[in-house]
Amino acid sequence: MEKESTIARAAFQAARYNFHVGPVEIARYGKEIITVLGANCQALASDVLGLPPDYRSAEIYLNFLNLFEIVPHLPHLETCQPRDVILLGPGGIQDYRKLHIALVADRDPESGLILVEHINVVDGCYAISPVDKVLTNKLHSVIYGVRRLKSFDHI
């Protein structure tokens, strides 16, 4: 059973990137904050996956509540499925709160490339991009891990 996104996807698609507006702020001030101030990648992931507001990139990466399974992804992302979480950043990150979250959206039917959806500082807004393009930016050049939500029954 797939849980529906609680915030209209259109709100995220029209949102500009704002580092300071994540899932905690949306839970506190309401979804209208997205259209006024924007949102960050953690807000999008939290909403799409139905995560608790305080479960962000570090919690997904470290998997404190055991909500995710680790998806083997090296050397390629061939095992990725829609809604998988790709955690990215520049090389050398030790503070996992700084990881960028991109969600696997689909595969491009023509090229076969994995497409990810994310709200990011590079584009300044919501984007669906080939993961290969995302990896060319030094802010997102290293994949730290891929996670797959186990079941919505855990939340």
Image: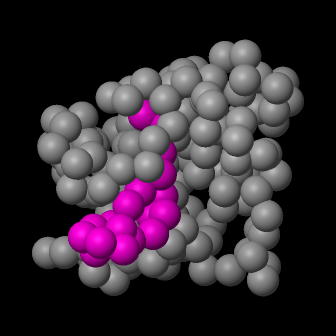
Q: Give the image location of residue 67, x and y in percent.
A: 61, 71
Q: Give the image location of residue 132, x and y in percent.
A: 21, 56
For the image, the number of numbered tags is 0
Residue 95 lies left or right of residue 40; in this view the side is left
Residue 92 occupies quadrant: top left
Give the answer, above or below, for where 17 lies relative to 1: above
Q: At 33% from the left edge and 29% from the top edge, which residue is drawn?
A: 122
Q: Please tell me whether the stretch drawn in magenta is mainly helix, strand or loop.
A: strand
| Viewer-closest of 64 and 99 | 99
| Viewer-closest of 126 and 85 | 126
Q: At 71% from the left edge and 27% from the top edge, which residue is drawn?
A: 34
In the image, farthest residue toward the front = 110
Q: Give the extent of the magenta segment.
A: 103-120
Point out the image quarter for the N terminus. Answer: bottom right
Q: Is residue 114 magenta?
A: yes
Point out the image quarter for the C terminus. Answer: bottom right
Residue 42 seen anywhere in this rendered image of the structure: yes
Residue 152 lies left or right of residue 99; in this view the side is right
Residue 146 occupies quadrant: bottom left
| Viewer-closest of 102 and 24 | 102
Q: At 28% from the left edge and 80% from the top edge, which residue is drawn?
A: 78
Q: At 49% from the left edge and 63% from the top edge, which residue is drawn?
A: 105
Give the answer, above or below, for where 139 lies relative to 52: above
Residue 23 seen anywhere in this rendered image of the structure: no
Q: Give the image location of residue 98, x and y in percent.
A: 39, 36
In the image, farthest residue toward the top = 36
